[in-house]
Image (cartoon, rainbow, N blue to C red):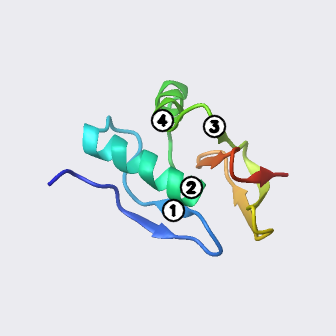
Amino acid sequence: MGVTLQFTRMEPFGIVILSDLSRAFGPSEAFHLRDLFGNHGVILARSAVLSQERRDELLGLLGDKARLSPAGPAQFTNADGVVLELVSQAVDFLVWDEATLTAS
């Protein structure tokens, strides 16, 4: 069985990754990250101190619809009109799926 990422669910949607994003992923972890993104639309990793190169690698794993949210308040609305409000710090990694969520 492959290695998977540790995470918890956010309410009303999205997940918080608990695993270390700064290290290189094996194939099963990369697959799991893409699957989590596809199923939940928002991925947050608190205190994720990542180089710009690593951020670009992670975004590349997630595909063209992945958008990295800047630090500060972010509000996401899903297709059902449910709103998720987050405050991202400069050391967080917060990414969302522009195909399924509206950000403001």
Q: Is residue 55 above or below residue 10?
A: above
Which residue is disc 3 drawn over? Answer: 65
Identity of the residue drawn at 56% across and 55% down:
44
Numbered label attached to residue 44: 2
Identity, as a three-letter code, of the amino acid under mark 3: Lys
Q: Position of residue 81 (x, y in %)?
A: 80, 68
Q: Residues within 10 Å of mark 2 (few under 14, many from 20)?
A: many
Identity of the residue drawn at 65% across and 74% down:
12
Q: CA distance from mark 1 to mark 3?
A: 19 Å
Which residue is disc 4 drawn over? Answer: 58
Q: How many numbered circles does the render carry? A: 4
Confirm or deny contact between disc 2 and disc 1 (CB under 8 A).
yes
Which residue is disc 1 drawn over? Answer: 16
- Please give left or right for residue 78 compared with residue 93 in the image: right
Identity, as a three-letter code, of the amino acid under mark 4: Leu
Q: Secondary structure at mark 2?
A: strand
Q: Is residue 26 visible?
A: no
Q: CA distance from mark 2 to mark 3?
A: 16 Å
Q: Residues within 10 Å of mark 4 (few under 14, many from 20)?
A: many
Q: Secondary structure at mark 4?
A: helix
Confirm or deny contact between disc 2 and disc 4 (CB under 8 A).
no
Identity of the residue drawn at 73% across and 59% down:
87
Q: Position of residue 39 (x, y in %)?
A: 51, 58
Q: Earlier in the sequence, mark 1 or mark 3?
A: 1
Q: Residue furthest bottom?
A: 11
